[in-house]
Amino acid sequence: MTANPSKVAIIRGDEPIEMVIKALALVGAEKAFKVEEKLLIKPNYINASHPSMGNTTDARAIEGIVKYFKEKGYNNIAVGEGSGFADTMKAYEVAGVDKVARQWQIKLLDLNKDKYEAVDAQENPVLSSVKISKTALNSAVISVPKLKLHRITGVTLSLKNMMGVVQPKGKMHFHLNEKIANLASIVKPRLAVVDGIIGGEGHETAGRPVPMNLVIAGLDPVAVDTVGAAVMGVDVNNVKHVKLASKKGLGVCDLNLIRILGEPIEDVKKTFKPSFSSYFMSRFA
């Protein structure tokens, strides 16, 4: 165990908002931000399905984050997503995020309509075919993914979730793992909060829900994704983009070097079943 291990909180319960607040308190979430900064909460609304289907972020996870930071004096908070297969604002409505925004007086942003900035091709040639949201580039990002599997990358967690800040998204899909790791070096989440209330097996839009009643959070997104993968029964050594991000110095992907707070992994772990297509699609990663 290192002297200053990455800390990841795993909280189990039946009150999602309070679970999120407890997880954030355990990892000292506010330490990663200044009160005057613009905080961008980046959920996963790949489509407009209800969070109970296991594809999209539960609004209660977002509300827990907003409540935690608002009560500590943070007032420049927005939720931003660029949906891949739906109208982003419709996806917010289906999930109930619009109600959270009204209650807490925060902005809802459709990043598909944002201004975008080209990636420096000499500095980062692997991402030269995409542009990145200026809002994401100019904000302190909180990634709030769903706990679910993915047909190409194996898992969709806090790093993969950042694909919502690029355009065109289709350009990401070849050599996807390398591109996700490189994107994380440009727009690295300072805080990752995984919605594991209802997970999703199969693949990213399979609609095969797995009740878990969990929230996983930490200031090291690589460590959070490592723990999230383990909770789904996935060996992080088989998750290329997380390993690549760790090699870039973006975080820890060794469970032996991660301090787990709250519930032990073995007490909450379930083996998520991947879709049949995952094996074949992995060749494109």
Image (cartoon, rainbow, N blue to C red):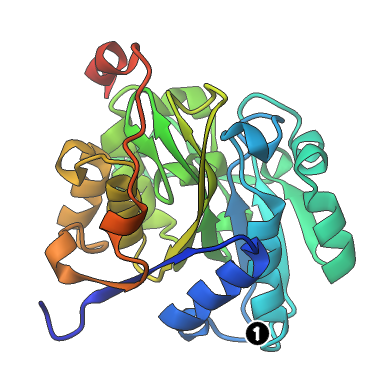
- Name the image quarter holding the N terminus: bottom left
Q: Position of residue 267 (x, y in %)?
A: 32, 57
Q: Position of residue 285 (x, y in %)?
A: 27, 25
Which sits in the foreground, 249 or 255?
Answer: 255
Give the total number of marks visible in the rendering: 1
The answer to whether residue 222 is visible is no
Q: Position of residue 101 (x, y in %)?
A: 82, 60
In the image, residue 7 above or below residue 85: below
Q: Secondary structure at mark 1?
A: loop
What residue do we see at 59% from left, 53% from top? 42
What residue do we see at 18% from left, 36% from top? 238
In the image, residue 71 above or below residue 51: below
What residue do we see at 42% from left, 46% from top? 157
The answer to whether residue 68 is visible is yes
Is residue 214 toward the left or the right of residue 180 in the image? Answer: right
* Classed neighbour count for the residue bearing mark 1: other residues with Cα under 10 Å, few (<14), some (14–19), many (≥20): few
Find disc 1 in the rendering and name its residue. 36
